[in-house]
Image: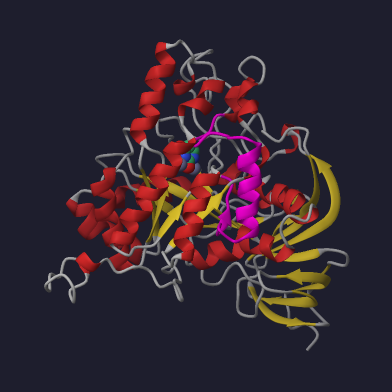
């Protein structure tokens, strides 16, 4: 039946998380309808000869239309954010919907629905950020959000306006466990960071480079360890965001090997830059202020090793876009001390080209690991059931890559709302050319081909934790705790 498909992608090399093969892909009604050596027909045929045909990237850590922990609005909304993500080879993204204390979870979701409505070119979901785990949020609002398909939320162990404390985390982890949701955590020891800030301020050390000093590696390691212990007590799954240190990654690796339901990501900035970038001339270092901070070359090597050994489930951008002007980095003055400079840097469009070029092209990770880290694992863990794999019945979310294209990154070529990219002048080999989302062409040979609002909110399922033993604390096991039924 020659005209049976809306689109046929022909002649390309398909790669999933588990295999690479030559095949044509037939797309009908937004889904992959056939995969075969040769497919005829198709109202439209995309010639992918010499190209890689990959599951579209899924970005699961980005801050879009969101206020920072100090109240600064991100430069990107769902319009520019989704377009930038699409140019970077993504076909779906999951930004955060952040609760301000005093706001109900329902109000948070309504606010972010209003912020995203009619804007996104890509399918999207939200992770909640929970800052106020009050009894109503725990018993009614969060379960309602999970049932609505928002099956993940993030908590902070630092930042006064966000920190939920260990007890709050235990309450949240228990609710997550009971409803099949997953808790993400920003893990840094709050007291260590505050103590360092006080010492540095007293010594007059407030230039951007001291940001890197102010958040010690030990602060990350200690908090990751504690967060995992809290999660293990109630046997809840935990996802550690933006791991930046060798010590933090080693803890995640050890606990995963021991069977804990622990997952983690690192980000390109921790692989590509070091604290020396915070010491760039003038205030240029402010462009590299993010939390946790950039580390050193040894940390980079360790993080690559952990990527090779599958310690990490995802590589995410942590796109936190604050412009290098008075709306962003210098919102608190033209020459502010580092604690007053917004934390974060852009990376939606460079996450995958960076990982492909430095990872696959340089032989550090395989093409299949690239697919797993950029798309498949995120889909499985965050419950995007029809995304992240090229298989019959899945959404036709596909990125067609030219693995040989060499391009230098410049701010002028970006499509976000930022005025800088930390990767300015870096040359990457391998770029996405064409991006489909549910069969619609979003990017075609480097040009935007979709209208704002085509992207849909995607309800998500609970994480698939099959095969992970988890941990039954004896004190919470009714067969060993004198029958006390106190665990979820
Ligand atoms: N944590 C993030 O995840 N992003 C930006 C800053 C921060 O602290
Ligand atoms: Zn964080
Ligand atoms: Zn973030």
On screen, residue 227 above or below 388: above
Q: Horizontal placement of 222 versus 435: left or right? A: left
Q: Residue at x 47, y 52 (%)?
A: 251
Q: Quadrant of the C terminus?
A: bottom left
Q: Image quarter for residue 44?
A: bottom right
Q: Residue at x 68, y 45 (%)?
A: 350
Q: Horizontal placement of 380 versus 88: left or right? A: left
Q: Image quarter for residue 295?
A: top right
Residue 24 among those drawn in magenta = no
Q: Nearer the viewer, residue 131 or 229?
A: 229
Q: Quadrant of the N terminus?
A: bottom right
Q: Nearer the viewer, residue 72 or 268?
A: 268
Relative image position of residue 351 (x, y in whole percent): 65, 47
Q: Residue at x 41, y 68 (%)?
A: 462
**Residue positioned most to the bottom:** 1
Q: Residue at x 23, y 48 (%)?
A: 167
Q: Is residue 66 visible?
A: no
Relative image position of residue 423 (x, y in whole percent): 71, 36
On screen, residue 72 above or below 268: above
Relative image position of residue 338 (x, y in whole percent): 49, 21
Residue 307 among those drawn in magenta = yes
Q: Is residue 256 visible?
A: yes
Q: Nearer the viewer, residue 213 or 285?
A: 213
Relative image position of residue 454 (x, y in whole percent): 58, 58
Q: Which residues are magenta?
A: 289-317
């Amino acid at each position: 039946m020659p005209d049976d498909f809306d689109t046929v992608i022909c002649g390309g090399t398909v790669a999933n998380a588990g295999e690479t093969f030559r095949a044509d892909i037939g797309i009908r009604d937004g889904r992959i309808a056939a995969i075969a050596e040769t497919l005829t027909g198709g109202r439209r045929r995309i010639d992918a000869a010499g190209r890689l045909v990959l599951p579209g990237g899924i970005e699961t850590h980005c801050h879009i239309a969101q206020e920072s922990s100090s109240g600064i609005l991100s430069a990107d909304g769902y319009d520019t954010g989704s377009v930038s993500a699409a140019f970077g080879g993504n076909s779906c993204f999951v930004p955060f919907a952040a609760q301000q204390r005093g706001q109900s979870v329902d109000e948070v979701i309504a606010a972010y629905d209003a912020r995203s409505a009619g804007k996104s070119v890509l399918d999207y979901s939200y992770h909640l950020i929970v800052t106020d785990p009050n009894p109503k949020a725990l018993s009614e609002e969060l379960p309602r959000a999970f049932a609505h398909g928002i099956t993940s939320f993030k908590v902070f162990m630092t930042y006064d306006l966000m920190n939920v404390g260990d007890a709050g985390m235990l309450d949240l982890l228990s609710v997550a466990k009971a409803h099949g949701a997953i808790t993400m955590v920003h893990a840094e020891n709050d007291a260590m960071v505050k103590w360092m800030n006080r010492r540095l301020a007293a010594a007059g050390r407030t230039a951007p480079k001291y940001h890197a000093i102010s958040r010690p590696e030990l602060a990350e390691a200690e908090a990751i360890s504690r967060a995992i212990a809290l999660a293990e007590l109630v046997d809840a799954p935990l996802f550690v965001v933006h791991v930046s240190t060798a010590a933090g990654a080693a803890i995640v690796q050890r606990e995963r090997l021991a069977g804990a339901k622990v997952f983690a990501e690192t980000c390109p900035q921790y692989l590509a830059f070091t604290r020396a970038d915070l010491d760039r001339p003038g205030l240029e270092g402010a462009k590299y202020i993010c939390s946790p901070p950039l580390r050193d070359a040894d940390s980079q090597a360790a993080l690559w090793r952990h990527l090779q050994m599958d310690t990490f489930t995802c590589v995410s951008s942590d796109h936190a876009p604050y412009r290098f002007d008075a709306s962003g980095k210098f919102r608190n003055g033209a020459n502010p001390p580092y604690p007053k400079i917004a934390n974060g840097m852009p990376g939606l469009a460079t996450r995958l080209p960076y990982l492909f070029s430095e990872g696959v092209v340089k032989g550090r990770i395989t093409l299949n690991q690239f697919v797993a880290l950029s798309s498949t694992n995120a889909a499985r863990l965050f419950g995007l059931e029809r995304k992240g794999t090229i298989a019959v019945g899945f959404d036709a979310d596909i990125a067609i890559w030219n693995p040989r294209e060499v391009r230098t990154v410049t701010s002028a070529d970006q499509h976000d709302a930022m005025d800088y990219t930390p990767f300015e002048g870096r040359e990457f080999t391998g770029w996405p050319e064409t991006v489909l989302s549910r069969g619609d062409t979003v990017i075609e040979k480097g040009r935007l081909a979709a209208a704002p609002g085509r992207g849909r909110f995607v309800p998500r399922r609970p994480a698939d934790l099959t095969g992970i033993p988890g941990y039954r604390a004896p004190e919470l096991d009714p067969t060993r705790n004198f029958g006390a039924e106190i665990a979820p």
